[in-house]
Image (cartoon, rainbow, N blue to C red):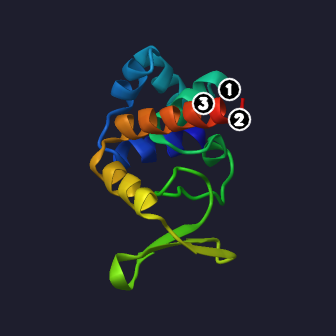
Amino acid sequence: MFYKRVSDLCAKNGIAMTTLAVNLGLSKSVVTNWKKTGAEPRPSTVKKIADYFGVGIEYFYEADVDINNVTGAAAPVAITSGHHNTVTLTNGGTHTRELSEIETELLKICEKLDTRKKALLLAKAYEILEAEEN
């Protein structure tokens, strides 16, 4: 399952598996090993790949997890545009709220970024969040 999930993410984002390996500082042969033997990388490598694509690590291991294209989290989320330029976030049908202008602007910026830059943006957001919490 791991190789298939990584392969799907690479295809969806227009990146070769070997390019992913190089971008993450891995050898190209590791990808071949994943494919031929079904081997899975160390947890730290899975985390690197998840961060690169902006998905949760559970995406690689749980059969019923889908990618949330909004945040990369593994949860069903829908974002809809409403009247008067409002944007609404619905999470799993249990929580609905209108996004602020800043949140909407962040989504617009995120849409324009490639996968690598989205991962960098997400990492920076987590840094800011951790600094707030400390």
Q: Are marks 3 and 1 in contact (CB under 8 Å)?
A: yes
Choose the circle earlier in sequence order: 2 or 1: 1
Q: CA distance from mark 2 to mark 1?
A: 25 Å
Task: Say which mark, if any, is on residue 46.
Answer: 3
Counting from the top left corner in percent of width and height, residue 61 is at: 67, 45
In this view, the residue in front, 22 or 93, is 93
Choose the circle earlier in sequence order: 2 or 3: 3
Q: Which residue is mark 1?
A: 43
Q: Is residue 64 above or below residue 35?
A: below
**Could you tell me which residue is drawn at 34 percent across and 77 percent down?**
85
Q: Looking at the picture, which amino acid does disc 3 mark? A: Val
**Could you tell me which residue is drawn at 64 percent across and 77 percent down?**
93
Q: CA distance from mark 3 to mark 1?
A: 5 Å
Q: Looking at the picture, which amino acid does disc 2 mark? A: Glu
Q: Are marks 2 and 1 in contact (CB under 8 Å)?
A: no
Disc 1 crowd rating (10 Å Cα; few below 14, some 14-19, many 20+) is: few
Q: Looking at the picture, which amino acid does disc 1 mark? A: Pro
Q: Is residue 37 visible?
A: no
SS category of the residue bearing label 2 = helix
Disc 3 crowd rating (10 Å Cα; few below 14, some 14-19, many 20+) is: some
Disc 2 crowd rating (10 Å Cα; few below 14, some 14-19, many 20+) is: few
SS category of the residue bearing label 3 = helix
**Could you tell me which residue is drawn at 64 percent across and 71 percent down?**
92
**Could you tell me which residue is drawn at 40 percent across and 76 percent down?**
86
Q: Which residue is mark 2?
A: 133
Q: Quadrant of the N terminus?
A: top right
